[in-house]
């Protein structure tokens, strides 16, 4: 489903009371798709099946920012080590990204409107 058709509350991941963890993936893409769109859908579907996954938010203009939320650092490590995710990471370095940065953060406080 395209984000333009989602309600605003569906664009923001529901998360539990802190503490929990956020992985912030900030990237600059290379030109063209080369299978990127299909892999992005597959990775989100797979991540949602991982133990400890809480939600995801993503936006892209000139820079892409995807934030995934996790119950623990162990859940993040398990996701990073997932074989299919490792393949996607390799493909990203080889053909989809000019550069990227990953930040892992502990969320200690949040509030909503």
Image (cartoon, rainbow, N blue to C red):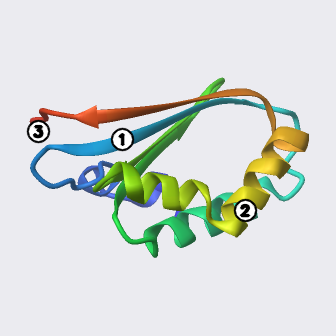
User: Label 1's element?
Assistant: strand
- Rate crowding at label 1 as few (under 14), some (14 to 19) or many (20 or more) other CA atoms within 10 Å: many
Q: Secondary structure beneath disc 2?
A: helix
Pointer 1 residue: 22
Of residues 92 and 51, the one nearer the viewer is 51
> Which of the two residues, 41 or 18, is positioned nearer the viewer here?
18
Residue at image point 24% right, 53% down: 9
Label tally: 3
Q: Which residue is mark 3?
A: 112
Residue at image location 66% in from the left, 58% down from the top: 40
**Which image quadrant is residue 105 in?**
top left
Q: Earlier in the sequence, mark 1 or mark 3?
A: 1
Q: Earlier in the sequence, mark 2 or mark 3?
A: 2
What's the mark number on residue 88? none
- Using residue 54 as the reference point, say whether residue 49 is left or right of it: right
Mark nearer the viewer, 1 or 3? 1
**Residue, disc 2:** 39
Q: Position of residue 64 (x, y in %)?
A: 60, 33
């Amino acid at each position: 489903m395209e984000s333009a058709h989602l309600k605003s509350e569906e664009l923001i991941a529901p998360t539990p009371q802190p503490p929990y963890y956020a992985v912030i993936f900030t990237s600059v893409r290379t030109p063209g798709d080369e299978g990127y769109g299909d892999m992005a859908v597959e990775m989100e579907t797979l991540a949602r099946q991982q133990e400890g996954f809480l939600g995801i938010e993503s936006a892209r203009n000139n820079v892409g920012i995807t934030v995934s939320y996790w119950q623990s650092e162990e859940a993040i490590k398990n996701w990073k080590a997932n074989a299919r995710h490792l393949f996607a990471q390799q493909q990203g370095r080889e053909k989809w990204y000019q550069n990227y940065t990953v930040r892992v953060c502990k969320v200690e406080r949040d509030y909503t409107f």
